[in-house]
Image (cartoon, rainbow, N blue to C red):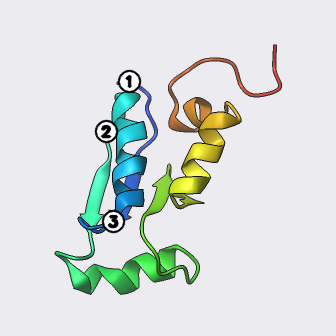
Amino acid sequence: MRGMNPVKLYTKSTCPYCVRAKQLLDQKGVRYEEIDIGREPSRRQEMIAAAHGRSTVPQIFIAGRHIGGCDDLHQLEEAGELDHMLGLGGAQPGVL
């Protein structure tokens, strides 16, 4: 999709929250870079540094901005802010 902001997820294949986060992004047709720290344990420290000390998965970044985990992603969706952050168009929250 044109103009879509890049999305990066740090995940583990055994993580149900990672699956939920990816399902939401897949439903929206969003492409994302997935880094499985179970398969690439050397990337775990990179994730922790980028996520300001958080060590749980998933850790989600949109346009280089740390969003948080699965619950944070779903809260953005419920608040109507996720599409705007992703660059999917639509009205900006609070703007008619």
Precedes in sequence: disc 3 or disc 1: 1
Q: How many marks?
A: 3
Number of other residues with Cα within 10 Å of mark 2, as a class: few under 14, some 14 to 19, many 20 or more? some
CA gap between label 3 and label 1 equals 30 Å
Q: Which mark is residue 31?
A: 2
Residue at 40 percent across and 48 percent down: it is: 20
CA gap between label 1 and label 2 equals 11 Å
Q: Position of residue 18 (x, y in %)?
A: 37, 58
Q: Which mark is residue 2?
A: 1
Q: Position of residue 75 (x, y in %)?
A: 65, 45
Q: Nearer the viewer, residue 55 or 91?
A: 55
CA gap between label 2 and label 3 equals 19 Å
Number of other residues with Cα within 10 Å of mark 3, as a class: few under 14, some 14 to 19, many 20 or more? few
Tag 2's secondary structure? Answer: loop
Which residue does the numbered mark 3 point to in the structure image?
A: 15
Q: Amino acid at mark 3?
A: Cys
Left of 34 or right of it: where is 17?
A: right
Precedes in sequence: disc 2 or disc 3: 3
Number of other residues with Cα within 10 Å of mark 1, as a class: few under 14, some 14 to 19, many 20 or more? few
Left of 7 or right of it: where is 50?
A: right
